[in-house]
Amino acid sequence: MSYPNDLKEYPQLEEKTYPFRLFFNECKNAKIGQNILYLHWHEHFEIIIMQEGSAIFHIDSKPYELHAGEVLFVSSGGLHVGYSLRDDHVRFISVVFHSSLFKDWKQDPQHEQFVVPYLENRYQLPVKPAELVPTCSTYYSLLDTIVDEVLQKGPAFQLVIKNQLHLLFVLLARTFLPEQVFSRTNERHSFNRERFKPLLEYMENHFDDKMTVESAARSVNLNPYHFCKTFKKLTGRTFIDYVNLCRVNEAERLLLETDFTVTEIAGRVGCDNPNYFTKLYKQYKGITPSRVRK
């Protein structure tokens, strides 16, 4: 699993005609609280299929537990991040696709009525549909078919995947569309998500910046108290904890991909004291930087 340089991701999908892709994610021997999906957003939809282990995903400020066999939906533009819930192997599949996958359906009035509102983010599916309506879990066999088609790559497998995804959206829309009304709470979450994106992206790219809670709060026009409260809802971590996690993740990348010394890496991620850096790295990764190099 690689670490994104920017908070906004640009997923490399299979091809322009069929903009979708499956990402097979695995974290062996994950520790409690370990980052298994790094905070990011993209203009694509994402469906996460949990195969093994348990995790908590924060989707636009709200936490959702996910266990083996369960599925969650991330709408286009949604900030999302995931952490392991216990010491265990974690495996999950991300089905990522762009709304343009269905552009040739635009002449169909039923498609315009039931599916397009979700593609255009006028309505949003529940993050965990089966938690609200248990019969939705019967639709997830369509996802199993999609995974099989990707693995086997038979003739016209892209078309099969496209049709399975569309059918899944139709069935879910038929279940939830009549009840969709954007509440003030949803509008507030959306506002906070957009407000915080530039700050989070800046943090992902300026690891050596010794930003304080006060300066971060000013950048989003909030007082420190409300900033800390909102930040925790969005990311699942405190501001300081998230800064440290960003630094440690970047340090891990540099340890594995460059020849910089441990002291040089410490400086590059904003830790002037190498001893403190070693202590911080071991706290988050369970191993010292020097041992990673060995």
Image (cartoon, rainbow, N blue to C red):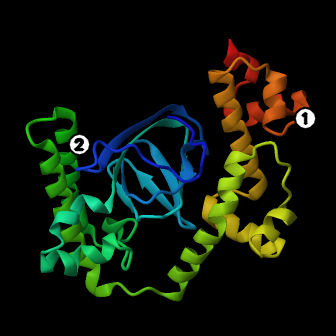
Q: Nearer the viewer, residue 176 or 246?
A: 246
Closest to the observer, 219 or 276:
219
Quickly name the residue at label 2: 147
Query: Please, which residue is most extreme toward the left here?
Result: 155
Name the front one of labels 1 and 2. Answer: 1
Decide: is 97 above or below 27. Answer: below
Disc 1 to disc 2, how far (Cα)? 46 Å
Residue 11 in the image: state x and y as whole percent. Answer: 42, 47
* Residue at the disc numbered 1: 272
Residue nearest the observer in this picture, 207 or 236: 207
Q: Is residue 231 above or below residue 251?
A: below
The residue depicted at 38 percent of the width and 74 percent of the height is 121
What x and y, as percent, mark residue 160?
Answer: 12, 49
Report if the CB atoms under discs 1 and 2 are less than 8 Å apart: no
Relative height, residue 249 to residue 226 (above, below): above
Disc 2 residue type?
Val
Q: From the viewer's perspective, tell me whether residue 252 is left or right of residue 20.
A: right
Residue 119 lies in quadrant: bottom left
Residue 233 position within the rendered picture, expressed as x and y whole percent measured from the top left? 63, 66
Q: Name the side, left or right, on which 46 lies relative to 150.
A: right
Q: Secondary structure at mark 1?
A: loop
- Residue at horizontal 68 percent and vertical 27 percent from the top: 254
In the image: residue 56, left or right of residue 235: left
Callout 1 environment at 10 Å: few (<14), some (14 to 19), or many (20+)?
some
Residue appearing at x 48%, y 87% in the figure: 183
Q: Position of residue 192 (x, y in %)?
A: 62, 73
Looking at marks 1 and 2 on the same chain, the residue that comes earlier in the sequence is marked by: 2
